[in-house]
Image (tube, rainbow, N blue to C red):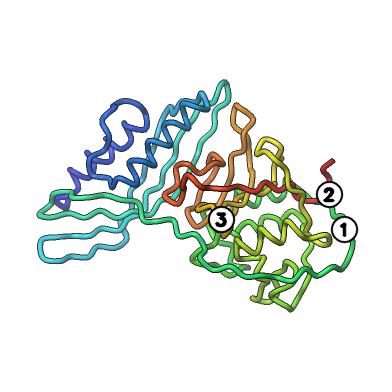
């Protein structure tokens, strides 16, 4: 049975797509102001990068419907793929978005993105110095892991609601990053027997670990995103209050030589590194750029 709200929802989604493709200047009417602003930032970013969105494909998958009399709240997953051209280079950016629409008597009232939920907790770990300083970081294996698992979950590891840093740690481990500090969760960077350090799974702890570690997994902070290489890491403080909430890994570069990243929580592949198209973005956002390992001059 085709629900009454399906046709207006499809019209709305087509408008949502056409606005991003610049096929219409009229903003989608059923999105909340926060998301309209997000779409505006996305389009400004595309223009600034001298990029072009050539095609957008979406797949709609509802997974929960709540009925309240004549009103329905539909939670759904939207698989989004954008084909982008940046100068003479092409790439496909993919995201899995979780959204909710409200309808009344089959009329679409509002459609909005569910918030990306950055990790609220942060923990202080104590640096633990042991072992040698250098290690051979296999960037290709780290990137391959990120490409394989960006929208799936390796059963060898625990999965969290906010899984971004856990995912990045898995990528680094696949690239031969050495663990240390077991079994003290406040020390080092490690995962062992379904237990883990704070720095393995908590974005804030992970950011400070990368800044201070001189043994095991080590990194060098650099000034610009364009200083990064494949397999390197970006950390995000969305609110600019020194509470670091998100982590991504560089998996490719666009036609301007800027990083494209893979991440989880909002599962993303080849996403432009600035995250201007995120509901978590604020004008106060801060970034930290880390070259992984000691193969950097």
Q: Could you tell whether 30 is left or right of 181 in the image?
A: left
Residue drawn at (59%, 39%), measured in percent from left and top?
260
Q: Nearer the viewer, residue 216 or 285?
A: 285
Q: CA distance from mark 3 to mark 2?
A: 23 Å
Residue drawn at (10%, 61%), measured in percent from left and top?
70
Q: Position of residue 104 (x, y in %)?
A: 13, 55
Check whether the beta carbons of the residues at disc 2 and disc 1 lie within 8 A of each other: yes
Location of the N terminus (image quadrant)? bottom left
Bin the neighbour count of mark 1 within 10 Å (Cα to Cα): few under 14, some 14-19, many 20 and up. some
Q: Secondary structure at mark 2?
A: loop
Indicate the quadrant where residue 197 lies: bottom right
Check whether the beta carbons of the residues at disc 3 and disc 2 lie within 8 A of each other: no
Which badge, 3 or 2, is on the more N-terminal residue?
A: 3
Q: Position of residue 109 (x, y in %)?
A: 18, 50
Q: Is residue 167 above or below residue 221?
A: below
Q: Secondary structure at mark 1?
A: loop
Q: Which numbered marker is on residue 201?
A: none
Q: Which numbered marker is on residue 294?
A: 2
Q: CA distance from mark 2 to mark 1?
A: 8 Å
Q: Position of residue 36 (x, y in %)?
A: 32, 41
Which badge, 2 or 1, is on the more N-terminal residue?
A: 1
Q: Could you tell whether 51 is left or right of 256 in the image?
A: left
Q: Is residue 215 above or below residue 2?
A: below
Location of the C terminus (image quadrant)? top right
Residue under pointer 3: 246
Residue under pointer 1: 133
Residue drawn at (27%, 34%), measured in percent from left and top?
27
Q: Nearer the viewer, residue 161 or 94?
A: 161
């Amino acid at each position: 049975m085709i629900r009454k709200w399906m046709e207006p929802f499809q019209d709305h989604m087509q408008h949502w797509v056409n606005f991003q493709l610049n096929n219409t200047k009229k903003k989608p009417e059923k999105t909340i102001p926060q998301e309209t602003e997000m779409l505006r930032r996305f389009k400004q970013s595309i223009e600034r990068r001298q990029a072009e969105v050539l095609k957008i494909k979406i797949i709609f998958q509802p997974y929960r419907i709540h009925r309240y009399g004549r009103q329905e709240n539909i939670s759904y997953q939207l698989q989004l793929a954008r084909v982008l051209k940046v100068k003479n280079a092409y790439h496909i950016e993919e995201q899995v978005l979780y959204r909710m629409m409200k309808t009344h008597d089959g009329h679409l009232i509002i459609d909005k993105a569910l918030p990306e939920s950055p990790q609220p907790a942060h923990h202080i770990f104590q640096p633990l110095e042991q072992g040698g300083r250098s290690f051979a970081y296999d960037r290709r294996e780290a990137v391959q892991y990120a490409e394989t698992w960006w929208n799936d979950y390796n059963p060898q590891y625990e999965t969290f609601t906010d899984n971004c840093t856990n995912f990045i740690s898995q990528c680094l481990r696949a690239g031969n990053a050495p663990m240390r500090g077991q079994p003290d969760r406040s020390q080092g960077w490690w995962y062992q027997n379904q237990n883990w350090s704070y720095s393995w799974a908590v974005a804030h702890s992970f950011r400070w670990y990368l800044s201070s570690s001189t043994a095991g997994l080590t990194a060098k902070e650099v000034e610009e995103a364009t200083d990064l290489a494949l397999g390197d890491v970006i950390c995000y403080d969305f609110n600019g209050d020194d509470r670091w909430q998100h982590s991504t890994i560089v998996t490719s570069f666009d036609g301007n030589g800027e990083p494209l990243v893979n991440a989880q929580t909002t599962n993303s592949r080849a996403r432009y590194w600035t995250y201007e198209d995120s509901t978590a973005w604020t004008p106060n956002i801060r970034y930290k750029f880390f070259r992984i390992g000691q193969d950097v001059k």
